[in-house]
Image (spheres, rainbow, N blue to C red):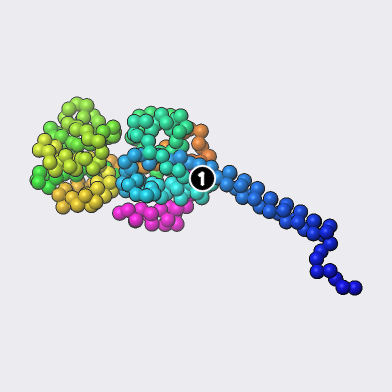
Amino acid sequence: MKHSDYPEPKTYSRRFASAFFLFSFLLSTSAAGESARKIFHFNISPNGYPPYMIVDQEAPSGIMWDVVSLISERIGYETVARKIPRKRVDQMLLDGYIDGTPRAIEWTHEPKNFLFTDPVVHIQEVFFTPKHKGETYHSPEDLFSKTVVAPLGYLYPELEPYFESGAIKRFDVPGEKDMFNFLLHGDRFDAAVADVLVGKWILRNEGLREHFTVSSGSLNSYGFRIMLRKENHSFVKDFNAELTRMRENGELDAILANYR
């Protein structure tokens, strides 16, 4: 008996139904996987904070962005950048508009209201001095009766008592890049305080490295972390575990090396 080249109608129907079921299952599984991937809204600020956050490119980059986006992906989150003005960050974090922002505990007015990860990197603040001043300042005492240029809204716990007493004068400018322009072109300014990587990054990109000296040692050192709402304990736990692995296997050092 010759076999038919086509399956019987019932057989064909069963095969079609099985294929349709398999396709539907794969589609639903894929959709479930996508929907299970949560969004982490991460503040990178309108002007960034190079080299920790760089925003003047097609896509965000920088030390903190690279680390946060990589770890978030590994623990089941997609990182989406948000640019929030500094004065609004804390409240918008509490309100749930963003999920995290880079921050040192020491720079936060009310740190008890928030949750912090382990330090991703350490901020080391130093004094930058114009070479034409003929001075290099290494400690707060060296700056008595002098004027320090600092970004508006930034806190410097080691210097605050001297600012309050008037022993050291403080002049606020909009951002880090402005500090160096004021120092170069303003006779009444003596030094700027900034993280060593931030300052050197700006001077390198502005072609000003030969115009400034840097204090030996650091004024202080702060852990630069991710600040979140208090209920995000699970995220912080998973983030810290992955950060520890990256530190131990050399991945973190490789990211840092890209920006030094």
User: Bounds of the magenta span?
Assistant: 239-260
Residue 64 lies left or right of residue 129; in this view the side is right
Secondary structure mostly seen in magenta is helix
Against 177, is 6 above or below? Answer: below
Residue 135 locus on image (x, y percent): 11, 44
Q: Residue at x 21, y 40 (%)?
A: 178
> Alpha-carbon neighbours of circle 1 within 10 Å: few (<14), some, or many (≥20)?
some
Q: Which residue is mark 1?
A: 77
Residue 247: tell me if it is visible.
yes
| Magenta residue check for 180 | no
Residue 180 locus on image (x, y percent): 19, 43
Which residue is nearer to you in this view: 235 or 43?
43
Residue 42 lies left or right of residue 137; in this view the side is right
Which residue is nearer to you in this view: 84 or 179?
84
Q: Residue at x 73, y 52 (%)?
A: 21
Residue 14 locus on image (x, y percent): 80, 56
Residue that sits furthest to the right in the current view: 1
Residue that sits furthest to the bottom in the current view: 1
Residue 24 locus on image (x, y percent): 69, 50
Quadrant of the image containing the C terminus: bottom left
Quadrant of the image containing the N terminus: bottom right
Residue 201 lies left or right of residue 212; in this view the side is right
> Disc count in the image?
1
| Magenta residue check for 254 | yes
Does dot 1 land on a helix, a strand or a loop?
A: strand
Residue 240: tell me if it is visible.
no
Q: Residue at x 84, y 57 (%)?
A: 10
Against 258, is 193 above or below? Answer: above
Q: Amino acid at mark 1?
A: Tyr
